[in-house]
Image: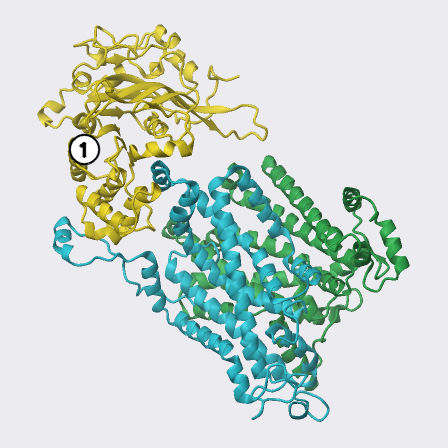
Amino acid sequence: MVRFLIRRILQGILVMWLVTVSVFLIFFVGPGPSSVARALAGKSATPQVVAEVSHRLLLDRPLYVQYGHFLWLLLHGNLGYSFYHSESVNSIIAAAFPITLSLVIGASILWVLMGVLSGVLSAVRARSLMDRTFTVLALFFYSMPTFVLGLLLLLVFYYEFTIHGIHLFPGSGYTSFTTNPGLWFRGLVLPWLTLSLVQAAIYTRLTRGSMLDVMGEDYIRTARAKGMPERRVIFRHELRAALTPIVTQFGIDVGVLLGGAIITEYVFGMPGLGFTAVQAIQEQDLPVVIGVVIVAAAAVVVANIIVDALYAVLDPRVRLH
Amino acid sequence: MSQSLASAAPPPTEPPSPAVIEGTAAKKIEGRSPWRLGLERLVRDRAAMISLGVIILIVLMAIFAPVIAALTGHGPDQQFAATGLTAIGQPKGPNSTFLLGTDNLGRDVFVRIAYGARISLIVGVAATALTIIIGAVAGLISGYFGGLTDTLIARFIDWLLAIPFLLFAISLVVIIGPSLVVVIIVIGFFGWASVGRIVRGQVLSIKEKEYIEAARALGANPWRIMFVDILPNVMAPIIVYATLLIPLAIVTEASLSYLGVGIPPPTPDWGQMINDAQNVYQYGAWWFLVFPSIALLVTTLSFNILGDGVRDAFDPRGDRLFV
Amino acid sequence: MSNEPVVSAPGDDILLRVENVVKYFPVSSSQLFRRQRDFVHAVEGVSLEVRRGQTLGLVGETGCGKSTLARCIMRLYDLTSGKITFDGHDISTLSRRSMRPYRRDMQMIFQDPYGSLNPRRRVGSIIGDPFAIHKIASGQERKKKVQEVMELVGLNPEHFNRFPAEFSGGQRQRIGVARALAFRPKLVICDEPVSALDVSIQAQIINLLADLQKEFGLTYLFIAHDLSVVRHVSDSVAVMYLGQISEIAPTSRLWDHPRHPYTDALLSAVPVPNPDHAGQQERIILVGDVPSPVAPPSGCRFHPRCPKAAPTCVEQEPVLEPRLGDDPDHRTKCHFPVADGEDLSLARPTISAEARIVETGILAGDDTSLTALGSKEES
């Protein structure tokens, strides 16, 4: 087990290293030697700033020195400096992360509850009206691009409500929990719904499929034949066994989303990681982009490792590999 | 949509006895391939067939977009300030001239939707084709040759899957410059990783089968084995995955356009129209937001339903590979 | 293709000569940094000869290495060491490309009629593979040849376009035969061709193989674990145990005068058709299971299970040579072979049971696992 973990962690480190190399190649080499400093300094930088950037980031030194410097800073937790905002990337990201966190945590609770429950019900009463209804709903939301859903929700619950005098949800923006919990919550409802409905659709299909696989197993039949109460069979045995792929998927999804639920944040104007990154791209503030990319990749890699470890715990066969 | 398969025809069970074989020597005997059986099942799936019909309609709409433009007298990029906008410069709702209303620049929404279908369909199909081809070849090579090749390709796939796709896509488009080809390549290039992984898994298990050994015993070279013997056996999951990938590619393209890094204006594009609409719906121009959204939704939904149908028809055991 | 039988060239009687072939497979260790490499000793120094036009039967229990040996001969595996001479040519170390021309003359029929045919390809295409791979014929000509072969093996040529799933087990095996015989090869290795078939079908296929051999002068290496089948088809028989040939003799000699205790035990286990005589046969029951091929026993590999085991057997590995005054074509690998008339069921080993355990590290009757404990081969 420990060997397995070590192997996975080493693999993760390798992947992260590859990510840093590719990021470096794209952003420090891609634009061409003369434009790198300019690109990194930002769209509206003056020549003096460009020169300072060039000096500070050792851009006149050979490539491997630059990369070494880059890597060195990274390993010390320094993600760079945004000349556009005159702020360290670390602080920009630190400000943006809680927003993404609130969004993702809240939505994930919602979608797991909705998705898994409906999936279980669908599987248990397969081919019934309820199952078909859930399948249709799942298909519907699954086909819906996130931004479309978000905008439509805004159209109905924000716009239509507002012109009829109901001010329930804000149109955009984020208020931190500490400032105003009520507004924090209300501001997050629509984004949560947007993110979770689409994800729930995926999870209900996943759960249904996984449950159906498990339900056909012989040992489940034996449990029923022994006279075990139905509810226990479903929740203690079937769901437990079916949970593995769901847990795997969940870990990956959360990892990916923590790297920035870009579209949802953009639609609702919430300055989380994703939104910050998109803005940075549009402002051509590359240090921020680099920082977010690395954080996002790290989140995915860590999530993958956790998921693999969990998988190995849940399914001992994996460890033998 | 998964219909019940209770009505599926059972495959031939008892092989014909030698006597029967002799008796039917005169008739030409055609084998019913697994494809044929699958197709027959698919045709019987009502929901899938309806979706197919809708898709065909959308394709027709895309092809005949210029005809629609001619009929209404409105080009896709023409701005009709006089007839299309209200006195204060706001878009007009659906009326007799503009069937689905106008956008913020006075352009005909209906005509733009028709033209936008072209982009979505082209990107959807082209990006998926690219993904499938690269993914299948990579998976075959990686799985069959094993060793160093496999390790390299597998790690490359890991890396591709670790990258936050949207961010990289956006960055790449910004650096290279947005265009139709770039968008197709970007979507296709990041998508092949999952296909490659799945194909590789299949190849690893098929590689050990006796008929592959038999092919080697006959003296077949690795490439022949990969493409003549192994590929037909991995086609089924590939095709099924393709039906999932097309709607995904369409949504991705729309998302990129929505974020402003897709096909550059003024080419009509659904994602972009929705982005433009975002700024005006507060003033009541709901049609501009709703109709392109419906177009996108209907297209994606149809492909998903068809995809479900294809999967049920060709893989009725329900291999939980792709859910 | 003409139907005249292949005439063996004078003085060139041996079509296939296998000399001291050894094949080991590395066992992947579970250590992170492999300190120790274990090997499966699948084939340990096998030598045999197959004469033109004859059939050599090869029998043994599951896991004795006969299938591995077959694949070594077919060069589907690389040899760890040893020499294989086919039709006068040394094919032991040829590359895949150089082996290609020889593959027209040596072919294999596989055991599993369900696994040896690609389910997604039409039968005509499968049988046509040899022609396509070696670029012999194409298009209509290829189709004609394929249909000729189909008829030859008893299949309806009209079924050219069918899929394997539409055929019965016996018919599928015929397809396998057709595929192997497309080029009228000189040597055909049959790897348990009837083991997976129903008994009545077995007879059909065996007769088919015999007919084809007569018609085309084929040479067979016939692998099986069913002795009655082997007896029916073979001119000579070799018995394999744990990667080595323990006895090899012309068929009738082997049945009437088995020398190796293992052979004797195998023969005693063959069911006797006549129920009146069935009870009379004394079953020789062997102790224990086949040891793991990762750490084979020292000396004679059979000694842990042999009813006649003696200390010499533990210390010295016997040589495969004629014993007890047998002819040169009857060779046995045993220190204390069974004499004519000797009743093996009365034999008792002269080494202690504990000594046997210490040697193999595996208790008699235990599951054989790949990690042998306390074996002499370790460290």
Q: Quadrant of residue C279?
A: top left
Q: Position of residue B272 (x, y in %)?
A: 64, 74
Residue B314 placement (x, y as % from top left):
38, 59
Q: Total of numbered circles in the picture?
A: 1
Chain in yellow on the image? C
Name the residue tied to disc 1.
C216
- Residue A296 visible at all: yes
Chain cyan in the figure, letter:
B
Direction from residue A268 to residue C74 in the image, left or right: left
Residue B288's place in the image compared with C182, above or below, is: below
Q: In percent of the image, x 22 and y 22: which residue is there?
A: C9
How packed mark 1 is, by other alpha carbons closer than 10 Å (few <14, some 14-19, many 20 or more), is: some
Q: Position of residue A206 (x, y in %)?
A: 50, 58
Camera-nearest residue between B56 and B198: B56
Q: Hue of chain A?
A: green
Looking at this view, name the residue that lies furthest to the right: A48
